[in-house]
Amino acid sequence: MVFGMGFGGAALIVILLIIASFRILREYERAVVFMLGRFWKVKGPGLILIIPGVQQMVRVDLRTIVFAVPPQDVITRDNVSVKVNAVVYFRVVDPAKSVLQVAKYLEATSQLAQTTLRAVLGKHALDELLSERERLNLDIQKVLDTQTDAWGIKVSTVEIKQVDLNESMVRAIARQAEAERERRAKIIHAEGELQASEKLLQAAQMLARQPQAMQLRYLQTLGNIAGDKSSTIVFPIPMDVLTRLGVVKPAQPQSS
């Protein structure tokens, strides 16, 4: 009877060990398996067998991880202090490296992203930081991706979310933008004056070459004046017309 109970208990233990040896990994999971403390292989997804007491496994998630980089104090190349935060998208592409090469890859990547953000943005001026975010995002992403490659991590995207300036700097930027608008307005006005003067010069040259056109211009001017309600009309008449009519005597050349 005792032998029967002992055999039954041993069989139950064996069955429980066999059940505990099977693990199910989802499609986005991998198991880094160690054999007596030494790395053996990467298994999964699906149903895998782990020998209890001999093999151990570390479960690794291969999905894209998104984490927010907390606001960082950055001093730009032109000595302006700003606060910048960002978002980093990365995923594990080599489960073995993510377990063997770094203790906590999520925390390590987060700390590296903070230092890289300060280092890269500190090399650029404030104007570049505000107007060229896409290029800066790409620069930060390339630096992070290169440094995390040894950990089996691929950094796919880095996005700068917000750049915070102090009140004095905001007012200075507003004054600069207003001055720039005034400069552009003056340039446009000067260009308009230049074009108008060029057209007036062309018209004057044409009238000088064509006296008949000048007569038509006098008649048009008279018509415009006649349409006004003024009681006095001053009509300019060329001197050559008055000379031909005998009203004005031609000028005699002076004898030397």
Image (tube, grey):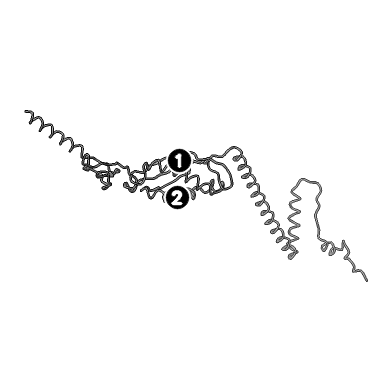
Quick check: 200 above or below 67? below
Residue reaching furthest to the right: 256
Left or right of 244 in this view: 76: left
- Determine the residue positioned at 36% across, 42% down: 103
Q: CA distance from mark 1 to mark 2?
A: 15 Å
- Determine the residue positioned at 9% across, 29% down: 5
In the image, residue 106 lies at what x, y percent? 38, 41
| Residue toward you, 193 or 245 | 193
Quarter of image, res 61? top left
Residue reaching furthest to the left: 1
The amino acid on which the numbered mark 2 sits, given as a three-letter code, is: Val
Q: Earlier in the sequence, mark 1 or mark 2?
A: 1
Look at mark 1 in the image and give the residue it sits on.
69
Left or right of 219 in this view: 52: left
What SS does tag 1 mark?
strand
Quarter of image, res 239? bottom right
The amino acid on which the numbered mark 1 sits, given as a three-letter code, is: Val
User: What mark, if any, has residue 1 been given in the picture?
Assistant: none
In the image, residue 233 lies at what x, y percent? 80, 50
Look at mark 2 in the image and give the residue it sits on.
143
Quarter of image, res 168? top right
In the image, residue 13 lies at what x, y percent? 16, 34
Mark 1 neighbour class, 10 Å CA radius: few under 14, some 14 to 19, many 20 or more: many
| Residue toward you, 16 or 194 | 16
- Determine the residue positioned at 26% across, 41% down: 56
Mark 2 neighbour class, 10 Å CA radius: few under 14, some 14 to 19, many 20 or more: some
What SS does tag 2 mark?
helix
The answer to whether marks 1 and 2 mark residues whose Cβ atoms lie closer than 8 Å is: no
Q: Quadrant of the C terminus?
A: bottom right
